[in-house]
């Protein structure tokens, strides 16, 4: 691990399981899925498909887009959890906000276009939140954080790649602190889009299962507060764990399908582990990308087998809890890894009935007490983007 | 700051690829129900795809992918590098593939979700262009797309430079681009962004016209770490690149003192005196209000620290779009490479020295962000 490793001093998460790390962990332990009926918009054709929707009691402030509201809530929680509200103003000038986002204000933009096409006119103010950067700027402005503001859109790996970029900002000395994570909301675009690709399960995703039918969509936001250990200790912050290593790669294979050999995923996992100064045998838990699509699960399984050989550590995909929250997924699952280390408990691969024999290892089927000192989180996306984060436990 | 007072280099540019309109604006039809029926726009009519890609490889790609992939292909060819696991892609696009997104949504709404178009969905994701570049050129290193409004290209450039500095990659392809889209133009027309008179752009020429003209294009750069053992292949070096954050968001006035300090910081970081700027290439776009900001800053900076300084614009070549700064940067690289100002730039103030060695590319954005690249030969 680096001499001055990147410490995680704050966590914020909002998802289909609720708000905050405690609610999230309780639901994970109880094996309670967040998948349920879609209600934030109607869909004549796909409305029956279960999704991981943020509970309806979550308040969207008037004038905010759903994406903005989720991002601001998750970021505020991570900020408060880390005590950033007490940062002196000089430190706020060196505090970055790095956000992974794919859909931005698409939910509201869709409504603009629907009115325009069906009624013949629409209010262009509906478009004011369209860009992905809108949420990033809102988070930074509302929390008074004046370091770099960066929005990355690396498809379903965005939340994880945002964390890697924030880590690089700190490691390179560009910033002292960074709030990094991801956000995405359910939209008509993504629901229709993934359904048109025939990769959505109509009874909820079952990652790595022999009878899996595809993914489930979700939404949410999650953020980590990141800073160097030295900086965290100097200001007396509580350290939840460390981002010990990270790496990204690209399959350069197909616009949507993963390289079946898993080579790109393997290179990301290998690179992150090398940066962490760890061996495969040091890893206690892998939070798999595990979307539940046929191709993704097999490619990821191939990469895991190649890295770990016969000694595959505990593996689970938590997508049936949250749904696939796209750009938020990698950040939510980073929180899951940190919770696994904090509570020394690995969440189940919910929905698994019979493992696909081609996977050739057995994911965790029930929440399990375990010694978790090193956890790995995989995130992969359209375009063959791969990102792996390696976390180590705070000692 | 540089060591021993010598000029520093942030990154070396090995190759450049540029896809831009040919400097001629033509009518663009706009969708009904939002505003005007058409608007003059700078459109890329001919893409030099065949120069770098087989036709079969491009048939499923949408407009932004074609723009950015073509630029990247030209840059890689210019740089003479081999793609592989140590080549990463850092794309910057403010709005992504708007055309594919709108087509997917129009179809979804008009046909009530009955016949969705999966290919349009695939192309609608922001990183579709970066992905296409990786697939077509074989770049297996990290692949990122920055989408942060008008500074998307600059932020992608910065992340690429940091990745090189960290030793994670041998080369990075930085590509910035945005495509013209009727919905975007019509919506922003309502905000007064575009002129209503049919007159092409002549930035900083004091025409008194309000509004610019929309455009599109893509520029790509193959970067490598300075000091790396090299074969001598080099187009330019970036001595400094900075992004200034907004201060008073949405304020129409520009803080001249703050902007002059920003430009001075860029020179200081480069380890070069402002007097060595041969030409400042600015993002003035022909809108009287926007041009006035550039005029006030460049006049003050010239008077305070530089002395006589060449001044030119580039948006008469490509129109206005979010990542147009890439066109300016590519133009600057070509200038320091050839040592001369191309006729199409038509400097407002001619450079003092006959040979161009140092160009400062400077942009101010409506949301308060500003950026500058110091480009040297």
Image (cartoon, grey):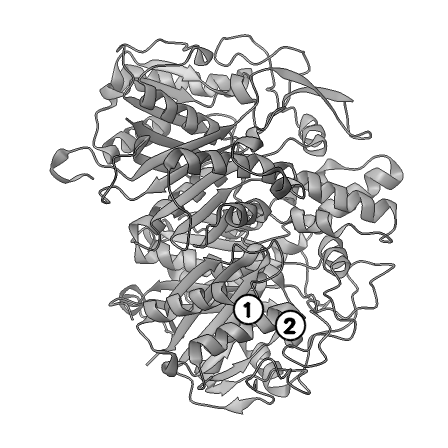
Choose the circle earlier in sequence order: 2 or 1.
Answer: 2
Figure disc tally: 2
Residue A95's spot in the image, x, y percent?
39, 53
Other-residue count near label 1 (Cα within 10 Å), few / some / many at <14 / 14–19 / ≥20: many
Label at residue A322: 2
As displayed, is residue A58 above or below residue A130? below
Q: Residue at x 62, y 37 (%)?
A: B55
Task: Give A111 or A12, whichever is nearer the viewer.
Answer: A111
Task: Give A395 or B166, whichever is nearer the viewer.
Answer: B166
| The C terminus of chain A: image quadrant | bottom left
Q: Is residue B167 left or right of residue B99?
A: left
Q: Is residue A220 left or right of residue B15?
A: right
Label at residue A332: 1
Other-residue count near label 2 (Cα within 10 Å), few / some / many at <14 / 14–19 / ≥20: many
Where on the picture, by quarter, is residue B341?
top left
Q: Secondary structure at mark 2?
A: helix
Q: Is residue B240 visible?
A: yes
Q: Secondary structure at mark 1?
A: helix
Mark 2–mark 1 contact, CB under 8 Å? yes
Question: How far is the residue under mark 2 from the one under mark 1?
Answer: 9 Å
As displayed, is residue A142 above or below residue A370? above
Task: Give A9 or A282, whichever is nearer the viewer.
Answer: A282
């Amino acid at each position: 691990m680096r001499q001055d490793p990147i410490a995680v001093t704050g966590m914020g998460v909002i998802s289909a399981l609720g708000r905050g790390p405690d609610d999230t962990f309780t639901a994970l332990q109880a094996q309670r899925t967040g998948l349920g009926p879609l209600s934030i918009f109607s869909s004549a054709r796909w409305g029956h498909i279960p999704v991981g929707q943020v509970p309806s009691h979550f308040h969207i402030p008037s004038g905010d887009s759903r994406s903005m509201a989720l991002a601001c809530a998750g970021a505020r929680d991570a900020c408060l959890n880390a005590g950033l509200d007490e940062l002196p103003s000089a430190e706020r000038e060196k505090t970055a906000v790095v956000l992974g986002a794919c859909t931005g204000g698409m939910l509201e933009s869709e409504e603009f276009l629907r009115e325009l096409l069906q009624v013949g006119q629409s209010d262009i103010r509906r478009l004011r939140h369209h860009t992905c950067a809108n949420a990033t700027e809102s988070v930074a402005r509302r929390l008074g954080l004046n370091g770099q503001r960066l929005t990355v859109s690396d498809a379903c790996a965005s939340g994880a790649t945002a964390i890697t970029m924030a880590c690089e900002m700190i490691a390179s000395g560009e910033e002292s602190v960074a709030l990094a994570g991801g956000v995405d909301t359910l939209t008509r675009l993504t629901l229709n889009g993934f359904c048109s690709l025939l990769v959505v399960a109509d009874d909820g995703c079952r990652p790595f299962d022999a009878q899996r039918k595809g993914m489930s969509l979700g939404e949410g936001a999650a953020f980590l507060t990141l800073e160097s250990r030295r900086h965290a200790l100097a200001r007396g912050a509580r350290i939840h764990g460390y981002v010990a290593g990270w790496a990204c790669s690209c399959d350069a294979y197909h616009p949507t399908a993963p390289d079946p050999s898993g080579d790109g995923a393997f290179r990301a996992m290998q690179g992150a582990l090398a940066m962490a100064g760890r061996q495969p045998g040091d890893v206690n838990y892998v939070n798999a990308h595990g979307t539940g699509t046929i191709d993704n699960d097999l490619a990821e399984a191939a990469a895991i087998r190649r890295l770990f050989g016969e000694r595959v550590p505990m593996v689970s995909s938590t997508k049936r809890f949250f749904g696939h929250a796209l750009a938020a997924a990698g950040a939510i699952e980073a929180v899951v890894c940190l919770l696994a280390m904090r509570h020394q408990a690995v969440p189940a691969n919910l929905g698994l009935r019979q493992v696909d024999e081609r996977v050739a290892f057995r994911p965790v089927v029930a929440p399990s007490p375990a010694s978790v000192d090193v956890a790995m989180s995989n995130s992969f996306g359209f375009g063959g983007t791969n990102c792996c984060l390696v976390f180590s436990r705070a000692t | 700051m540089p060591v021993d007072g010598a000029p520093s280099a942030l990154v070396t540019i090995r190759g450049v690829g540029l896809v831009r309109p040919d400097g001629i604006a033509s009518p663009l039809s706009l969708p009904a129900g939002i505003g005007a029926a058409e608007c003059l726009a700078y459109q890329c009519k001919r893409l030099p795809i065949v120069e770098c890609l087989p036709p079969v490889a491009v048939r499923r790609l949408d407009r932004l992918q074609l723009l950015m992939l073509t630029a990247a292909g030209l840059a890689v060819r210019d740089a003479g590098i081999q793609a592989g696991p140590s080549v990463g892609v850092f794309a910057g696009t403010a709005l992504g593939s708007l055309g594919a997104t709108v087509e997917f949504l129009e179809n979804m709404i008009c046909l009530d979700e009955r016949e969705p178009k999966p290919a349009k969905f695939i192309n609608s994701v922001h990183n579709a262009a970066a992905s296409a570049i990786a697939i077509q050129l074989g770049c297996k290193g990290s692949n990122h797309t920055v989408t942060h409004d008008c500074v998307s290209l600059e932020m992608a450039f910065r992340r690429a430079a940091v990745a090189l500095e960290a030793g994670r990659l041998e080369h990075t392809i930085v590509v910035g681009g945005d495509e013209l889209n009727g919905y975007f133009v019509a919506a922003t027309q309502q905000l007064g962004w575009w002129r209503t008179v049919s007159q092409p752009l002549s930035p900083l020429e004091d025409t008194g016209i309000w509004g610019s003209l929309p455009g599109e294009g893509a520029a790509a750069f193959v970067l490598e770490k300075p000091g790396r053992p090299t074969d001598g292949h080099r187009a330019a070096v970036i001595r400094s690149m900075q992004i200034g954050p907004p201060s008073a968001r949405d304020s129409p006035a520009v803080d001249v003192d703050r902007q002059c300090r920003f430009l001075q910081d860029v020179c200081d970081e480069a380890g070069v005196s402002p007097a060595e700027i041969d030409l400042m290439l600015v993002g003035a776009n022909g809108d009287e209000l926007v041009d006035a900001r550039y005029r006030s800053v460049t006049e003050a900076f010239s008077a305070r620290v530089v002395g006589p300084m060449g001044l030119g614009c580039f948006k008469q070549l490509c129109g206005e779009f979010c990542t147009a700064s890439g066109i300016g940067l590519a133009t600057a690289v070509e200038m320091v490479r050839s040592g001369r100002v191309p006729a199409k730039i038509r400097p407002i103030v001619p450079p003092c020295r006959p040979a161009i060695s140092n160009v400062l590319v400077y942009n101010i954005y409506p949301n308060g962000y500003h950026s500058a690249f110091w480009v040297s030969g």
